[in-house]
């Protein structure tokens, strides 16, 4: 089996390489592909140095599975060409809501892979970590409504925004003037309630992604309202989630369900430090659930605090897990 990564030199591309390195997937060859700017550079993988190839000249037939980690514009132009010769797992938002493209979180809806037509889409990082605890709860107690506020790390916006956080923090502490290039306002020692562009109703595209993708992955009848906030954290998205069920629930059973949710771990000690923060989740494959509480204003609702590494389960790890499912359950 041969794999390829398009956008191999970017944040998600490099994380995909790291996840593949640690995985049990047996590879004959791994092809690394990027723009002309990165062509000719080398990246080490399993003890060997791999030369990055130029996307413009790359032959997609060389790999059976190809990860796209290069953004929506690249996906729009190149995925249709690639899909004629390889199975594409795309990290961008471009294909997520297309009817004939499966939007997959393996622990939640791996059965959707049966319907792929050589293009599979990876959900938004914030959607992904939210549907992990939602899925088993929805199976047991039908979910009526979800209200979520996100606290999203700058790594979700790319390398330049990460660098801007570091540069602004240094300048702020040195008493220098702060300038913002990648954010609408200063991000250092601040937070910004704005991710992606606004629509006519005042929601941002990031917020609408969470709504629409959750419906596609889980159940179109679930109502979702999101507020997405960029925070001065390097890596790791956090979410405060209020879940309302159709009927009354058993709280102890909710705890048991969450403790057994695939890909998740409950850390909820109800004392100082007895919860997970994004710093502790960084570098971990697990999605953590803390602060589990009854909603004291609604007998049919609960509150959760959910934290995950947005570059791992929120991106690279999920794509590799999709590939593992394909290799296990279908003839690639």
Image: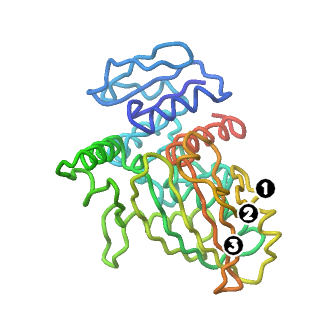
Is 51 situated above or below 201?
A: above
Q: Which residue is drawn at 41% across and 42% down?
A: 79
Judge from the rendering whether residue 193 lies leftward or rightward of residue 236; answer left or right: left
Q: Which residue is drawn at 42% across and 49% down?
A: 156
| Residue for badge 2 | 136
Q: Residue at x 27, y 57 (%)?
A: 186
Q: Distance between the residues labelled 2 and 1?
A: 9 Å
Mark 1 Cα within 10 Å, few/some/many (few <14, many 20+)?
Answer: few
Tell me which label, 2 or 3, sits earlier in the chain.
Answer: 2
Q: Determine the image quadrant of residue 227.
A: bottom left
Tell me which label, 2 or 1, sits earlier in the chain.
Answer: 2
- Return the residue nearer the eye: 283 or 257: 283
Mark 3 Cα within 10 Å, few/some/many (few <14, many 20+)?
Answer: some
| Quadrant location of the C terminus in the rendered image | top right
| Quadrant location of the N terminus in the rendered image | top right
Q: Do callouts 2 and 1 mark residues in contact (Cβ within 8 Å)? A: yes
Judge from the rendering whether residue 230 lies leftward or rightward of residue 248; answer left or right: left
Identify the secondary structure beneath mark 2.
helix
Residue 221 coordinates in the image, percent (x, y): 60, 76
Q: Distance between the residues labelled 3 and 1?
A: 17 Å
| Residue for badge 3 | 293
Identify the secondary structure beneath mark 1.
loop
| Residue for badge 1 | 260
């Amino acid at each position: 089996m041969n794999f390829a990564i398009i956008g191999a030199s970017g944040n998600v591309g490099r994380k995909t390489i790291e996840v593949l390195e640690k995985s049990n997937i047996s590879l004959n060859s791994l092809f690394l592909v990027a723009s002309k700017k990165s062509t000719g550079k080398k990246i080490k993988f399993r003890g060997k140095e791999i030369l990055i190839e130029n996307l413009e000249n790359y032959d997609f037939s060389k790999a059976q599975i190809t990860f796209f980690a290069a953004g929506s514009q690249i996906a729009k132009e190149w995925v249709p060409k690639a899909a004629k010769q390889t199975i594409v797992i795309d990290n961008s938002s471009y294909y997520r809501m297309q009817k004939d493209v499966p939007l997959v979180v393996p622990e939640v809806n791996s059965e959707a892979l049966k319907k792929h037509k050589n293009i599979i889409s990876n959900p938004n990082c914030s959607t992904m970590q939210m549907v992990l605890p939602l899925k088993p709860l929805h199976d047991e107690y039908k979910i009526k409504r979800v209200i979520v506020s996100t606290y999203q790390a700058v790594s979700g916006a790319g390398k330049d925004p990460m660098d801007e956080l570091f540069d602004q923090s240094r300048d702020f502490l040195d008493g220098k003037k702060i300038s913002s290039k990648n954010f609408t306002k200063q991000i250092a020692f601040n937070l910004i309630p704005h991710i992606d562009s606004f629509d006519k109703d005042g929601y941002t595209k990031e917020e609408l992604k969470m709504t629409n993708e959750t419906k596609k992955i889980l159940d179109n009848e679930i109502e979702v309202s999101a507020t997405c906030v960029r925070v001065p954290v390097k890596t790791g998205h956090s979410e405060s989630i209020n879940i309302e069920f159709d009927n009354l629930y058993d709280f102890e059973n909710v705890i048991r369900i969450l403790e057994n949710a695939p890909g998740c771990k409950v850390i909820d000690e109800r004392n100082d430090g007895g919860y997970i923060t994004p710093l502790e989740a960084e570098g971990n494959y697990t999605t953590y659930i803390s602060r589990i509480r009854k909603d004291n204003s609604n007998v049919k609702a609960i509150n959760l605090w959910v934290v995950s590494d947005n570059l791992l389960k929120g991106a690279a790890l999920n794509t590799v897990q999709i590939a593992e499912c394909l290799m296990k359950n279908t003839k690639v």
